[in-house]
Amino acid sequence: MQTVTLNNGTEMPILGFGVYQIPSEETERAVADALAAGYRLLDTAAAYGNEGAVGRAIEAGGIPREELFVTTKLWVQDAPAQDNTRRALETSLNKLGLDHVDLYLMHQPYGDVYGQWRAMEAANREGLAKAIGVANFHPDRLLDLVLNNEIVPAVNQIETHPFFQRTTDHDLMREHGVQHQSWGGFAEGKNDLFTHPVLSGIGKAHDKSAAQVVLRWLIQRDIVTIPKSVNPDRMAQNFDVFDFELTDDQMVQIAGLDTGTTLFFDHRDPDMVAWLSKRRLDS
Ligand code: NAP
């Protein structure tokens, strides 16, 4: 598996498996299938409600821990967040049945961000999280965090797909050593991504699907991607993207699909800030 090297030297697979919106009762089977298909990077979150099922699949899979790369995410914590963050990480580790995660992400740029980050820095120093990072941070918030804290986030996981390519974010992250990770790489199928004429046309030239073209395009931009599927055939298809290369012309064609706006919601929208900030998880 091709990897990227994070800013603290940790190696991270460039392709993994996301479990958002997989109901807990289906997650153990889905993760077992993904591990059997060859995935070694698993991306979950406290907010997905399926960490326990991910943990059971990891245990049943019997794959040596050092071959896996497990990411989970911290939900928004109240101030002062240091104790709450520590407790949230311990809860996630218990559910996952692990003594450390490979990557711990702050899921949203809200709440006591600095308190949360200081607790995450402490967890990183203790080895409970081999790397720490953030998700859904726009460039202004990311740069503030980078410039005013000790540990630079290793990763920023943000909505990134052919219709929202995040080139400005990407350049800023690269400049500061923050690895770009895509969520919603298929835009969850919006804009008819899986049958889009440009993506399907490029796929035809390589005997690949539009989905495979999208994953290849992300990988060629050095962006870590975590497609979600509950279907073993599609899991295998999404994993089979290392035997072809998009040409410069094909990369330019895909660049032309960028609309520069989200297909989901803007994390700077006051209504979304209020809505997400209000949510609290039951432990
Ligand atoms: P996604 O990966 O863009 O799309 C998933 C959808 O695509 C599912 O409906 C899946 O259906 C379908 N699909 C998968 N492979 C396919 C293929 N080869 N052909 C046709 N359809 C295919 O959506 P996502 O789950 O939102 O994003 C991926 C991961 O990113 C998540 O699972 C999660 O780990 C992470 N994420 C993070 C955040 C954040 O705030 N940090 C937000 C959203 C997501 P089937 O399952 O039926 O195959």
Image (cartoon, rainbow, N blue to C red):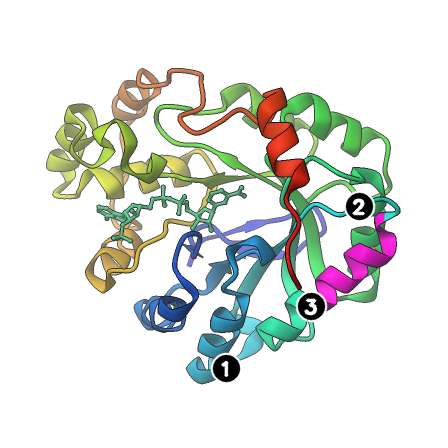
Mark 2 lies within 8 Å of ligand 1 (Cβ measured): no
Q: Nearer the viewer, mark 3 or mark 2?
A: 2
How far apart marks 3 and 1 lie (CA) works out to 17 Å
Secondary structure, mark 2, is loop
Residue 236 makes an appearance in the image: yes
Residue ID at (40%, 41%): 219
How far apart marks 3 and 2 lie (CA) works out to 16 Å
Residue ID at (44%, 18%): 261
Q: Which mark is residue 91?
A: 3
Residue 105 belongs to the span the image colors magenta: no
Left or right for 110, reference 49:
right
Residue bearing the label numbered 2 = 78
Residue ID at (85%, 38%): 149
Q: Which mark is residue 248?
A: none
Neighbours of disc 1 within 10 Å: few (<14), some (14-19), many (20+): some
Residue 174 makes an appearance in the image: no
Secondary structure, mark 1, is helix
Kindly report the secondary structure that dominates the magenta region of the rendered protein: helix
Residue ID at (65%, 23%): 139
Residue bearing the label numbered 1 = 59
Residue 86 belongs to the span the image colors magenta: yes
120 in relation to 253, above or below: below
Q: Earlier in the sequence, mark 3 or mark 1?
A: 1
Under mark 2, the amino acid is: Asp
Residue 1 percent coordinates (x, y): 42, 59
Picture quadrant where residue 79 is located: top right
Residue range of the region highlighted in magenta in the rendering: 81-90
Q: Nearer the viewer, residue 58 or 172?
A: 58
